[in-house]
Amino acid sequence: MTKTCLGHCQATTPVEVLKAEHRVIERGLDAMERQLTQSTIDREFFLKALDFFRSFADRCHHAKEEGELFPVLESAGVPRDGGPIGCMLAEHEQGRRLVRVMADHLEAAAAGDKVAEDTLRRAGADYIGLLRQHIQKEDHVLFVMADHMIGPEEQKLMRSAFDRAEQSNGNSGKHERYTAVADELTRCSLASP
């Protein structure tokens, strides 16, 4: 798997695509976790990180799950309400809320406001924990169900829908761009004293 194609080059199924995206998201989470241990809030780092989580983790990755995977699983009999899909959707919303909290407190935290800094750090830690356990549930439960429940023809259609979404609305090259951002976040977090 090469970095430039985010695993899409070898990924043949929708689940493989989503798992490859999880690995990139985890790199962003690792970088943010390291950055949260620093004595001050690095405004530029967090601006990049929040954009990464909004644009890549949510608008790209979660959008595929919500727009393609979850509806197909629902039509195959997986319940939304009280089931795994509803749980994943609730966690997506919780993640969005935590990203908003971090964004709302970033400027004040970077300027030295200790209350804002504590709020940002708490929201950041909560977000990291949420996404890590969310990814584990998807990789080891939901995606396993998807591989068993979705037939080859439907998987092919879903994969085509993923590819179309990545090429539409100015999204061309988005994966490569955000893989590079994950690399940059990693470098910045490792370079911090």
Image (spheres, grey):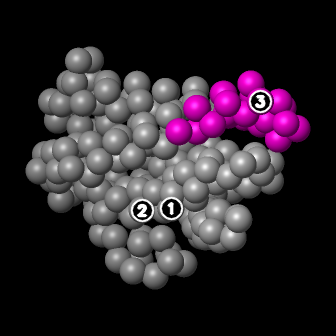
| Residue 186 percent across, percent down from the top left | 60, 66
- Judged by its main secondary structure, the magenta piece is helix
Q: Is residue 135 left or right of residue 121?
A: left
Of residues 153 and 77, which is closer to you in this image? 77
Q: Amino acid at mark 2?
A: Arg
Q: Are marks 1 and 2 in contact (CB under 8 Å)?
A: yes
Instruction: Kindly report the distance in space between the C-alpha atoms of the residues bearing marks 3 and 1.
Output: 27 Å
Compared across the picture, whether 155 is left or right of 120 comes to left
* Residue at image coords 30%, 69%: 12
For disc 2, the neighbor class at 10 Å (few under 14, some 14 to 19, many from 20) is some
Find numbered disc 3 in the image and state the secondary structure of the residue it sits on.
Answer: helix
- Highlighted magenta segment, given as a residue range: 101-125
Q: Amino acid at mark 1?
A: Arg
What number is the disc on residue 23?
Answer: 2
Percent coordinates x, y for residue 148 in the rendering: 11, 50
- Identity of the residue drawn at 48% across and 70% down: 6
Residue located farthest toward the bottom when viewing the structure as drawn: 2
Asked if 100 appears above or below 180 in the picture, the reply is above
Residue on which disc 3 sits? 114
> Tag 1, which secondary structure?
helix
Q: Position of residue 63 (x, y in %)?
A: 49, 42
Mark 3 vs 1, N-terminal side? 1
Residue 17 is covered by the magenta coloring: no
Q: Quadrant of the N terminus?
A: bottom left
Answer few, some or many: residues within 10 Å of disc 1's Cα (few below 14, many 20 plus, some between 14 and 19): some
Mark whose residue sits in front, 1 or 2:
1
Circle nearer the viewer, 3 or 1: 3
Q: Tell me if residue 159 can be seen.
A: no
Of tags 3 and 2, the one toward the viewer is 3
